[in-house]
Image (cartoon, rainbow, N blue to C red):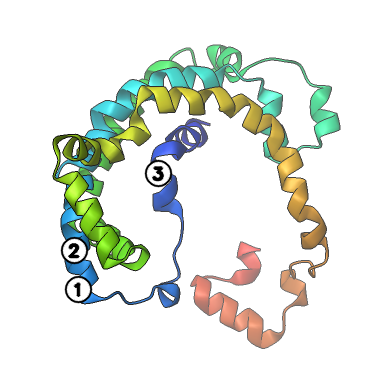
């Protein structure tokens, strides 16, 4: 439960980091454009940005967001987990907060400990990769913008207002105004998820069902056992 809440709450900050990118789809960029883009990326993602975002800034935001999530009816979480919405509607309106007050009176304190230790640690970890992130950002700019456009962006970032905008751009994702809006839509998003998931149900129904262990050939079972490093039948 604690892990699920933290994943949901961290979504506004880490969403882009969770999106897989196929290496084969990445196109090479013009070195001349990359040279123009690198100073822009350096302004937008200065050293220490990730540690600041995932540390003190996010710590301040997590408390209110956590309150909003834990005050949602448990049945809304169960719907997202796959429970039939009609069955879920017959459940009570008890919230996670009310449930945890019975199961674990120290639930909120535990969450605070996790947030106050995990977020700074995540910030330090992400900070180690800022140079690579900056280079990736520069490559993206070089791919998206022409030389003239990059010159104009660079010129803007050299102005006082441009420098202020660029240096604080990444931090907008952890701004209380933005996070507050995200927090407000969370309950509605959770309620909408079952219907949203239905959009793929029809297409998924057209696909063959996953095979069971008994459906596999002898060679496939042996290959599966080798991949698992254990008896696949027992794992099944």
Which disc is residue 36 wearing?
2
Q: Residue furthest bottom?
A: 219
Distance from label 1 to label 2 (Cα)?
7 Å
What is the secondary structure assignment of the residue under circle 2?
helix
Q: How many marks?
A: 3
Q: Which-is-in-front pick, marks 3 and 2?
A: 2
Picture quarter with the C terminus: bottom right
Q: How busy is the neighbourhood of tag 3: few (under 14 within 10 Å), some, or many (20 plus)? A: few
> Is residue 142 shown left or right of residue 189?
left
Q: What element carries label 1?
A: helix
Q: Can residue 27 be seen in this view?
A: yes
User: Toward which corner of the image does residue 202 lie, by quadrant?
Assistant: bottom right
User: In screen coordinates, is 185 left or right of 59?
Assistant: right
Please provide percent x and percent y for residue 136.
28, 62
Q: Which of 56 and 44 is in front in this view?
A: 44
Residue drawn at x 40%, y 22% as measured from the top left: 177
- For the residues labelled 3 and 1, the Cα–Cα distance comes to 31 Å
Task: Please tell me which residue is depicted at 50% across the width and 35% down the height of the picture.
Answer: 8
Label located before the other in sequence (3 or 2): 3
For disc 3, the marked residue is 14
Residue 32 circle label? 1
C-beta proximity under 8 Å, tags 1 and 2 = yes
Bin the neighbour count of mark 2 within 10 Å (Cα to Cα): few under 14, some 14-19, many 20 and up: many
Query: Mark 1 Cα within 10 Å, few/some/many (few <14, many 20+)?
Result: few
Residue 228 image point, x, y percent: 52, 71
Whole-percent x and y of residue 132? Answer: 22, 60
Residue at the spot 32% in from the left edge and 21% down from the top edge = 60
Q: Position of residue 18 (x, y in %)?
A: 44, 52
Answer whether labels 3 and 1 touch (C-beta < 8 Å): no
Q: Which residue is drawn at 81% across and 37% down?
A: 84
Q: Distance between the residues labelled 3 and 2?
A: 27 Å
SS assignment at label 3: helix
């Amino acid at each position: 439960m604690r892990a699920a809440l933290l994943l949901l709450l961290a979504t506004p900050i880490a969403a882009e980091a969770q999106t897989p990118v196929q290496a084969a789809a990445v196109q090479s960029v013009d070195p001349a454009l990359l040279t123009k883009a690198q100073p822009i990326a350096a302004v937008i993602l200065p050293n220490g940005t990730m540690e600041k975002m995932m540390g003190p800034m996010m710590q301040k935001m997590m408390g209110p967001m956590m309150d909003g999530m834990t005050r949602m009816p448990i049945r809304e979480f169960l719907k997202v987990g796959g429970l039939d919405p009609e069955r879920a509607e017959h459940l009570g309106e008890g919230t996670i907060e009310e449930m945890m007050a019975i199961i674990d009176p120290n639930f909120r304190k535990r969450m605070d400990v996790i947030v106050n230790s995990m977020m700074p640690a995540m910030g330090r970890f992400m900070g180690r990769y800022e140079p690579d992130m900056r280079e990736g950002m520069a490559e993206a700019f070089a791919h998206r913008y022409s030389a003239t456009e990059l010159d104009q962006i660079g010129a803007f970032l050299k102005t006082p207002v441009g420098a202020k905008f660029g240096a604080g751009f990444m931090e907008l994702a952890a701004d209380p105004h933005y996070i507050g809006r995200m927090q407000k839509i969370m309950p509605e998003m959770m309620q909408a998820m079952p219907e949203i998931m239905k959009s793929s149900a029809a297409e998924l129904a057209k696909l063959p069902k996953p095979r069971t262990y008994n459906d596999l050939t002898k060679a496939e079972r042996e290959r599966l056992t080798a991949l698992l490093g254990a008896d696949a039948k027992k794992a099944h």
